[in-house]
Amino acid sequence: MAESKHTKVLIIGSGPAGYTAGVYASRAMLSPILVQGIEPGGQLTTTTEVENWPGHTEIQGPDLMVNMEAHARAMGTEIIGDIINELDTSVRPFVAKGDSGTTYTADAVILATGARAKWLGMESEEKFKGFGVSACATCDGFFYRGQEIVVIGGGNTAVEEALFLTNFASKVTLIHRRDELRAEKILQERLLKHEKIETLWFNTLEEVVGTDMPLGVTGVKTKNVNTGEITEIPCAGVFVAIGHAPATELVKDVLETHNGGYVKVEAGSTRTSIPGIFAAGDLTDHVYRQAVTSAGMGCMAALDAEKFLAEQE
Ligand code: FAD
Ligand code: NAP
């Protein structure tokens, strides 16, 4: 028979926002349940060195998230490997349905579902996804030892991925639609002086080219945004690093969103447009999108939920 679980606080998501909410809600004696989702540990599990988490000059992303999980668990958070498919915000308690068949009922919900990689949306990108086209250098970089790779984008992710991929590739070309990077200055400096990295400015990806049998990438065609000139670059791997979109599938029709789909919260709080539903981390934040700010919002969400529940009583 399908299981049903009730909790005062259901935390959906296991990135820095979710685990921090778990620590704070546990310490407030709310016995929270945290559902991890398809990516336990969140986005930082897809990277290597994290150099801006206070207290560690350098820590591996996956290690940091294992530590956070252990911390939340030690404080008393019940951590469950499940994916929430549906959230009914029209009833009290709120009802969430898990992929496992479990139904979770909760007096308050903290949404910490973060963000997911964006794709360019072109046919050839789709065709070669998983066969030369990737959005995760940490996951797939190893497959391109001694080969040429291109990275698309100009933010922190693109620059970090390009630098990381030099560990495997013979050459990395960073293709960006402008001639100015959005990435932090320290990363830009490392990129621009790296002997294995070339940059191609004012270019966008026009097409990924490759073979059908076996399915694989042999190069890309790029287009100069000023002149329309097409450049062909041979490569075995294409890493798309053009940003992330908030994971709002559960609530996009019921919660107010803004700035391209980010869940709107009241200024200075994590309160959403539905009382009892709180949101924290990259799901709500189109500006900072950092581990430490997400963790901060996770803390705020647990404190906001505690106050909400006390007021209900
Ligand atoms: P996320 O980390 O996105 O986690 C979201 C969680 O929600 C996941 O666990 C997922 O499984 C879960 N989830 C989603 N949908 C569901 C569902 N339906 N049911 C249950 N669970 C669900 N920031 C830094 O500060 N420093 C860095 O060095 C740094 N490096 C980065 C490198 C890369 C490659 C990337 C992509 C990001 C990096 N960031 C870095 C940004 C940082 O990872 C994010 O700001 C942070 O992880 C956001 O935390 P979050 O808790 O909001 O969500
Ligand atoms: P981002 O900062 O939004 O950068 C996306 C990049 O992709 C931009 O350079 C953008 O170009 C380009 N782009 C977007 N759409 C495109 C398209 N259709 N075609 C071509 N190029 C396109 O995303 P991000 O780099 O993934 O970073 C997300 C957040 O995580 C940021 O807040 C970042 O600081 C954080 N993060 C932090 C670290 C760190 O602290 N070390 C590491 C990784 C990520 P334009 O510049 O022209 O807009």
Image (tube, grey):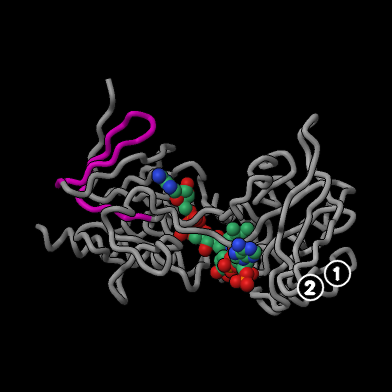
Residue type marked 2: Arg
> For the point 26% across and 66% down, which residue is it?
271
Q: Is residue 96 magenta?
A: yes
| Position of residue 89 in the picture relative to residue 222 (left or right) | left
Q: Which residue carries the number 2 mark?
A: 190
Q: Which residue carries the number 1 mark?
A: 194
Q: Would you call the spot at circle 2 few (<14 residues within 10 Å), some (14-19), or many (20 or more)?
A: some
**Residue 269's x, y, as percent?**
30, 71
Identify the image quadrant of residue 172.
Answer: bottom right
Q: Is residue 31 magenta?
A: no
Identify the image quadrant of residue 60.
Answer: bottom right
> For the point 83% across and 55% down, which residue is it?
167
Q: Is residue 61 above or below residue 183?
A: above
Q: Would you call the spot at circle 1 few (<14 residues within 10 Å), some (14-19), or many (20 or more)?
A: some
Q: Is residue 226 above or below residue 79?
A: below
Q: Main secondary structure of the magenta part?
A: strand
Q: Are marks 1 and 2 in contact (CB under 8 Å)?
A: yes
> What is the secondary structure assignment of the residue under circle 2?
helix
Residue range in magenta is 91-111
Quadrant containing the N terminus in the rendered view: top left
